[in-house]
Image: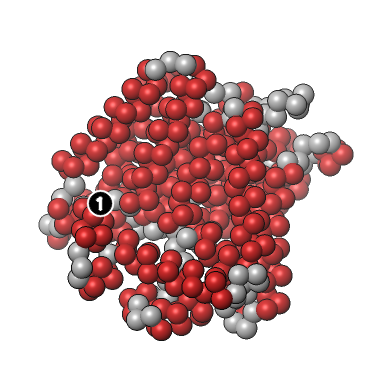
Amino acid sequence: MSFQWSRVNHFLLLLFFAVLPWSKALVSILLVACLISGLFVFDRKQWSKAHFPRLLLLPILYFMWHLIGMIWTSNTDFGWFDCKVKLLLSLVPCMVYLQVDSIRLHLEKYVLAFYLGIAACLTTLLAFAWFRILKTGGVEEFFYTRLSMFMHPSYFAWYINTAILLLIFSMGFRSGDSWLRWALIIFFTLGVLLLNSKAGIFGWGLVVLLSFGLKWIESKRRYYIFSALLWCIIFATIFKIMMPAGENRMGQFKHALSDSSSDYREMESTSTRVQVWHSSWQLIVQQPWLGTGTGDVKDELVAAYEREGFSFAAAHRFNSHNQFLQSWLALGIIGLLILLALLILPVWSAFYARDPFLIVFTALAMFNMLVESMLEKQDGVVFFALFYSVFLITFKNPNDTGETSDIRQVA
């Protein structure tokens, strides 16, 4: 019976990693299934061992502070909805911990399933876009939200950039499979280009520069610095050549900063972010200690947009488009400090242990959180909590004499 549960459990985890970019509903179902199967395969003797990373308590604490924030909330409907989303910050780490033996033993296979899911999803989206082009003749079907049908392009680009990070360090591949690894890196890079998310494009550069920079620090070989610069030059050149003028959001970004037309600026995402950041900061100044409460943050923001004449932001009921401002505004200074601890403490430990995966993944997450409220939707919460937990649970502490998975050794 134990063997049967192990096989079922292994299959469920493979599916869970593979369907991440596909369906929120399927991800939720598989998360529950993995939690239940984890209860059957979990070695209860581990409760008495020092295998639970204390840093995994921080996402759970962040969720609990959202519950406490309901005390001074008026809009309880939205508050409980937000708590339901943040509950995933507790459930995913618990699932990973219950599955700790399987993840440490088969992490390479789960990462390969993640690659397969990303590649299959991107291929499917490109096929759908091609069929739509045959009907409409519009090349815009290959870009941004027209391409990314399953989630916002910024989230999908975050997924892809994480896959590229893992591929750069050869996670899941042996030396003889380098051609396939490079083929995936090129294909995924093309996906980031076509998604045309500014956060995704800058995030790609951050992953490449940090990953090769850490390789250079480790090996002292200048080859990695030249490789990173060459990658960025090639990326920028291809972007410039292949991107149609009407779809060049980087060009729109530059134009928005220089154009004085308020109508145009209000529609461009960069200038809209500046507006919502301004409104968020003004509200934070008014109530910095406790914030608005878990459920009132959206109402307070919309009211501020209306007072300041930001009709586009008010009509779309935008959040703060910055996770740090969003957390501070909703939960006060304690909520912000928990979020900062959740992100900074793992990086501190990872630098000490020279763990490039946790360093670059957390840096990429922090960058995305600067321009998006990434933990306000299931797409962001599940993905962040999963890889955050996996990297921590397989993290090799220099002072720890326990074993870790071979896959966490840098190639």
Classify residue 284 by image quadrant: bottom right
Q: Is residue 354 in sight in this rendering?
A: yes
Judge whether 118 appears above or below 288 on screen.
above
Judge whether 31 appears above or below 192 on screen.
below
Classify residue 133 by image quadrant: bottom left
Q: Name the side, left or right, on which 315 lies relative to 86.
A: left
Q: Is residue 95 in sight in this rendering?
A: no
Q: How many marks?
A: 1
Image location (x, y in percent) of residue 25? 52, 60
Nearest to the observer: residue 226 or residue 146: 226
Image location (x, y in percent) of residue 94? 70, 50
Q: Name the side, left or right, on which 251 lies relative to 360.
A: left
Nearest to the observer: residue 343 or residue 383: 343
Nearest to the observer: residue 325 or residue 356: 325
The crowd level at tag 1 (other Cα within 10 Å; few <14, some 14-19, many 20+) is some
Image location (x, y in percent) of residue 158? 43, 47
Give the residue at x 71% y 35%.
Answer: 101
**Outermost residue, left side:** 137
Q: Name the side, left or right, on which 100 lies relative to 247.
A: right
Give the residue at x 14% y 53%.
Answer: 245
Secondary structure of the residue carrying numbered label 1: helix
Q: Which residue is mark 1?
A: 250
Image location (x, y in percent) of residue 279? 44, 72
Tell me which amino acid carries mark 1: Met
Q: Name the side, left or right, on which 291 lies relative to 191.
A: right
Give the residue at x 69% y 47%.
Answer: 56
Q: How is the image coloured?
A: secondary structure
Give the residue at x 25% y 68%.
Answer: 265
Classify residue 359 by image quadrant: top right
